[in-house]
Amino acid sequence: MSDFQQNGYVTTFHNFRSKKYDEIKNELIEFSKLRPMQLILPSLYSEFLGVAFPEIIKKLKHANFLNQITVGLDNANKTQFLRAKRLLEKIPMRVRVIWHDGPNMKSISNLLRENGLDNSVPGKGRNVWYCMGYVYGLKNCEAVALHDCDILTYDLEMLSRLLYPIANPAYNFYFCKGYYSRIANNKMNGRVGRLLVSPLIDALRIMSKDNSGFLDFIKSFRYPLSGEFSFRRRLIRDIRIPFDWGLEIGMLSEVHRNFSKNMFCQVDIADKYDHKHQKISFDDSSKGLSKMSFDIIKTFIRKLANQGIGYNKDSLRALKATYYRTALDYISSYNYDASMNGIEVDINYEEKLVELFAENIFKAGNIVLEKPQEMNLMPNWSRVRSAIPRIYERINEAVEADNKL
């Protein structure tokens, strides 16, 4: 039986396999006359040297429903920037590279720092934030999609389905989250989503029963950590996003705060999805999935604090214990599910991950308690423009100067 379930909170677009990609693409071309579309690709230079991104670039040559592609480039010197630009020249539509390490964009970030508007460190969230400001200032699109550059199973149907709910002029959605199965190579992937985020949400709901609107909202999404989402351009103006690995949860939090529930949705974008997998880094919480878990946990605790739900050392211990017991129950369910479907699950390895995440809940929570004034959020672009009235023009000038090199 096809899955047609709606959860009553977030509208879900399923894939009933009843409309082919060519039909969706032709509709998007029509939609683009009223809602021009743009794609944001936050990237590291190393991804240009990998397996996935060069293949994504080849496929994007045929995405003729897009008006522009904006690539946010991190960790690149001048030679690497020029090499990346040459690789992107294969794409026939307008492409712009935001070279974050270049002198022109550094002058922009220094200007923002001087005005107290950028206290960030390099990361995906920071990359996305600058790309969003650039796109907002262009005024050449109404629908924007964003996805990662390490997707090994990428195809244009994924992008077209991600854009469809936002680009369709008959719909009034302002934010759309992609979701997909995380089964690949006979393994259950999505370790942080399965073993941290899902049980952590349940544990937080247990401990904040009277104020769980935000948590109910997050739980309504099938894959909250999906790096693939789309949105209307005007959304950019009012949201504050984390500059670190808390980007996806932080983005959902801002959407929940700024828009009514009939303005966001989720869409099934792929039957299979695989990407480059991060190392765990059991011994170093500043790297790998351990670092990712730290940032996500801190984002949850800070977001709940904004709603008047606070934690102290005793409640953090209780949260750690509640999470741990809940996560073990999840592992048991995953194991049953995997066994029936002929997929192997290493229970010992999964429980080690849960033990690491449980420790990180207590450690990350204590960091928030010890430094409550320390924020991982970028300001919204309305504030930036009020402080620097020509900021959009200056970013555009910086990007155009770099792209003429």
Image: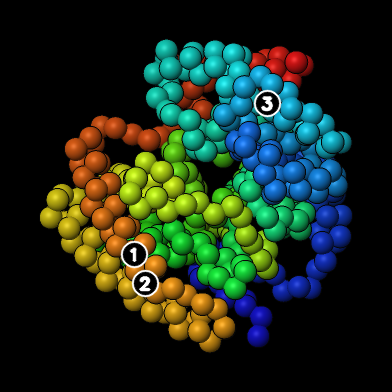
* Residue shown at 51% from the left, 28% from the top: 381
Instruction: Looking at the picture, tell me which residue is in the foreground, 94 or 355.
Output: 355
Residue density around tag 2, few if under 14, some if 14–19, many if 20 or more, within 10 Å:
few
> Mark number for residue 294?
none
Going by the numbered disc 1, the residue's amino acid type is Lys
Q: Is residue 341 above or below residue 257?
A: below
Given residues 268 and 294, the one toward you in this image is 294
Label 3: few (<14), some or many (≥20) within 10 Å? some
Q: Which residue is mark 1?
A: 352
For disc 2, the marked residue is 348
- Give the quarter of the figure containing the C terminus: top right
* x and y percentages locating residue 247 in the rendered image: 47, 44
As helix, strand or loop, the secondary structure at mark 3 comes to helix
Q: In terms of secondary structure, where does tag 2 sit?
A: helix
User: Which quarter of the image is occupied by the N terminus?
Assistant: bottom right
Along the polypeptide, which appears first: circle 1 or circle 3? 3
In the rendered view, does 256 fall on the left or right side of 27? left
Which of these two is toward me, 228 or 50? 50
Image-quadrant location for residue 74: top right
Can residue 13 be seen here? The reply is: no
Residue occupying image coordinates x 77% and y 54% = 156
Q: Left or right: 342 with respect to 55?
A: left
Going by the picture, which residue comes out furthest to the left?
Answer: 314
The colour style of the image is rainbow
Query: Which residue was labeled with disc 3?
Result: 80
